[in-house]
């Protein structure tokens, strides 16, 4: 048989390579803006027509290029940014592969005008579809003015693949925002079809964020600052009450490069745990600086993923820094419990002397002894300050706990035997009690989930939960993909006291359970756990434990429809407000609401 291998002609090879760098107009915008930044421009203007399909122009006042450099810049692997492989490890430029201009020029009509500061005249080069059309000496301003027309004109298949103008414009705006947020000290402007979309003047980071996202952003921002050996964090997060249904404004920059990281995003979300309503997301603008040799910089130019050496440490630092800031700026809401309890003091006790507030509780007291369905774990008072063991810096929350512990002030009297808080159960679902400002209504199910969740999380991150050998091991049937998930959770489940003795093709055998979980609960727990892991991205032990604690708490919490004695009701109240984040269930549901006296009075004044 004759030989069949042929070398591709240069222009075909270039077009194929170009397709990797340039996926859409926004990719061109990104490369050109980054080149202008690398050229130390202080003013960068981006002009777009028809979502970049007909024109993308970037004008900068940077250092420009000499006539020879201007021509060389369009050769593949032509770069001024690195010379040796070692340079790769101390990069401080956006580009370094020397591919962008060659790629862009291969699939567009490109015209570049450029001039260096000390030159009288500049250079103009035209390259159409990778072919040099002309090089001229021209009069032009200092810096570089590059004009890209008719993207993909010679690859119709790619051109037809472009999305609607609205979508491509959205991508361009995203790109413009990311680059401009990376460099607040540079002036940027964006024009689309002759109208000005953005004009961003140089300033500090806060000013830049406000200029990009609107004046009402300012009050939402909470500054973040942390400096450790392996990670420096700067930037802003938003207060929980300004969280959004969309995930829109979430930005991570690593060494000034925009990146996407589901894993680090999880760390942020985790720090907001309990502060957000179900389905809401915080906005954030976080600038991480890590030693350049601790990340894989050899990433593809169009990709936004980054690989970190010490991902788990970064996760923990980010999470605790944000938690700390949320606490410090007092954005974690605190319920104002009545201090001198006059409103809810039963008449007959009025003249008794009060006892000093105490947070000690009887550790052996089990209010749920008679109600085995509602499994209840008593919180040890020494325990709840260190709920999150990795979170050493979290003093702010400890302060909050002390404030919240003021509820103990309500224990003003001895011998308050049956209902020390004047609680009342409504439709076996809510617990009502009076507080200084009016009434608090607690959802017994969501509140108990929160209590159990913090309890389990503390236990799991510390010594684990002990399991008890079952007389008859349980066989739970599962499908293959579920089995895979369980396999990954086996050791964490074991520290939760749930021992999987065997994993078969379509079932698992459980031979030990913590005493708190009844056998009838275990199947629904395992199913819910699997469901949660299907939607969960990170695979670290930290988040696995978190999910296990969540699912345990949801399965074991007192359900609506359960009658609670006064003691049990009081205990829920007590335990809930000793929680680190009492406002929401671990799944983000509101645990309690308050109705103020004014609101009540209004009802009677209609
Ligand atoms: P890279 O940015 O990876 O080096 P590019 O293909 O984007 O590769 O650019 C090639 C070279 O052209 C750059 O290294 C730089 O020297 C020069 N260059 C590109 N754009 C500009 C610009 N706006 N101003 C000055 N020099 C530029
Ligand atoms: Mg470049």
Image: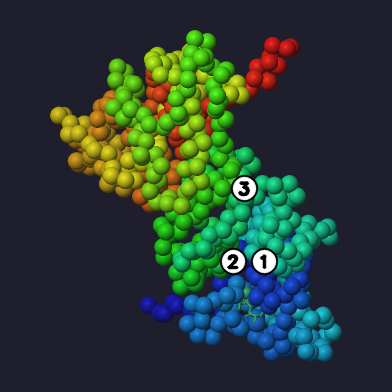
Give whichever of discs 1 and 3 has the lower sequence position.
Answer: 1
The number of numbered discs placed on residues in the rendered structure image is: 3
404 vs 261, nearest the viewer: 404
Quick check: marks 2 and 1 in contact, CB under 8 Å?
Answer: yes
* In this view, the mark in front (2 or 3): 3
Tell me which numbered mark, 2 or 1, is placed earlier along the sequence: 1
Residue at the limit of the structure toward the left, as seen here? 471
| Residue in the image at 64% along x and 64% along y | 182
Rendered image quadrant of residue 465 = top left
Vertical comparison of 244 with 38: above or below? above
Q: Which mark is residue 256?
A: 2
- Residue at the spot 56% in from the left edge and 48% down from the top edge: 328
Q: Quadrant of the C terminus?
A: top right
The answer to whether 531 is drawn above or below residue 219 in the figure is above
Quarter holding residue 224? bottom right
Determine whether 328 is above or below 598 in the image. Answer: below
- Residue 351 seen: yes
Provide residue 579's location: percent of width, then percent of height. 45, 35
Q: CA distance from mark 2 to mark 1?
A: 8 Å
Residue closest to the eye, 18 or 562: 562
Ligand 1's quadrant = bottom right
What crowding class fits label 1: few (fewer than 14 Cα within 10 Å), some (14-19), or many (20 or more)?
some
Report x, y in % for residue 394: 47, 49
Q: CA distance from mark 1 to mark 3?
A: 20 Å
- The residue singled out by tag 3 in the image is 238
Q: Is residue 508 visible?
A: no
Q: In front: 70, or 83?
A: 83
Answer left or right for 571 relative to 435. Answer: left
Q: Secondary structure at mark 3?
A: strand
Residue at position x 42%, y 31% from top?
358
> Does the residue at mark 2 contact the one at mark 3 (Cβ under 8 Å)?
no
Mark 2 or mark 3: name the one nearer the start of the chain: 3
């Amino acid at each position: 048989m004759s030989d069949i291998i042929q070398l591709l002609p240069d222009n075909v090879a270039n077009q194929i390579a170009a397709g990797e760098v340039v996926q859409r107009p926004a990719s061109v915008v990104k490369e050109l803006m980054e080149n202008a930044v690398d050229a130390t421009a202080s003013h960068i203007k981006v002009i777009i027509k028809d979502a970049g399909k007909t024109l993308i122009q970037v004008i900068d006042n940077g250092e420009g290029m000499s006539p020879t450099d201007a021509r060389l810049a369009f050769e593949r692997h032509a770069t001024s940014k690195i010379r040796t492989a070692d340079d790769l490890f101390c990069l401080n430029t956006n580009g370094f592969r020397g591919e962008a201009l060659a790629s862009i020029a291969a699939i567009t009509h490109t015209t570049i005008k450029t001039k260096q500061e000390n030159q009288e005249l500049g250079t103009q080069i035209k390259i159409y579809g990778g072919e040099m059309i002309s090089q001229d000496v021209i009069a032009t301003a200092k810096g570089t003015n590059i004009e890209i027309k008719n993207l993909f004109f010679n690859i119709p298949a790619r051109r037809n693949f472009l999305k609607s103008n609205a979508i491509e414009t959205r991508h361009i705006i995203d790109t413009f925002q990311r680059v401009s947020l990376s460099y607040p000290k540079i002036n940027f402007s964006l024009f689309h079809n002759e109208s000005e979309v953005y004009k961003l003047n140089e300033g500090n980071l806060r000013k830049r964020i406000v200029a990009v996202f609107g004046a009402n952003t300012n009050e939402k921002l909470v500054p973040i600052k942390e400096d450790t050996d392996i990670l420096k964090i700067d930037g802003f997060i938003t207060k929980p009450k300004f969280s959004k249904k969309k995930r829109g404004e979430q930005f991570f920059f690593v060494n000034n490069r925009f990146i996407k990281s589901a894993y680090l995003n999880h760390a942020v979300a985790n720090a907001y745990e309990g502060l957000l309503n179900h389905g809401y997301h915080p906005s954030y603008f976080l600038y991480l600086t890590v030693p350049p040799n601790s990340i894989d910089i050899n990433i593809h130019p169009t990709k936004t993923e980054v690989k970190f050496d010490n991902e788990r440490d970064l996760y923990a630092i980010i999470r605790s820094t944000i938690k700390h800031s949320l606490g410090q700026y007092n954005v974690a809401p605190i319920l104002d419990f009545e201090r001198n309890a006059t409103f809810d003091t039963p008449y007959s006790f009025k003249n008794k002397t009060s006892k000093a507030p105490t947070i000690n509780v009887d550790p052996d007291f089990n209010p749920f002894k008679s109600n085995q369905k509602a499994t209840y774990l008593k919180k040890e008072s020494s325990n709840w300050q260190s709920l999150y063991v990795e979170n050493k810096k979290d003093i702010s929350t400890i302060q909050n706990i002390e404030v919240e512990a003021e509820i103990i002030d309500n224990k003003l009297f001895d011998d308050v035997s049956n209902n020390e808080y004047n609680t009342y159960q409504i439709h076996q679902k809510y617990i009502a009690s009076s507080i200084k400002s009016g009434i608090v209504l607690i959802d017994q199910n969501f509140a108990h989930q929160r209590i159990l969740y913090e309890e389990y999380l503390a236990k799991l991150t510390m010594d684990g939960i002990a399991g008890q050998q079952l007389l008859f091991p349980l066989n739970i049937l599962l499908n293959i993909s579920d089995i895979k998930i369980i396999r990954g959770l086996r050791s964490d489940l074991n520290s939760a006291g749930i021992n999987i003795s065997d994993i078969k093709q379509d079932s698992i055998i459980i031979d030990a359970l913590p005493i708190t979980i009844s056998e009838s609960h275990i199947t629904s727990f395992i199913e819910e756990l699997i469901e949660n892991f299907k939607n969960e991205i990170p695979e670290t032990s930290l988040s696995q434990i978190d999910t296990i604690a969540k699912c345990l708490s949801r399965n074991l919490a007192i359900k609506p429809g359960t009658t609670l004695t006064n003691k049990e009701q009081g205990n829920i109240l007590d335990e809930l407000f000793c929680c680190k984040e009492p406002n929401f269930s671990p799944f983000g549901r509101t645990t309690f609401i308050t109705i103020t006296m004014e609101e009540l009075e209004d009802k009677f004044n209609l």
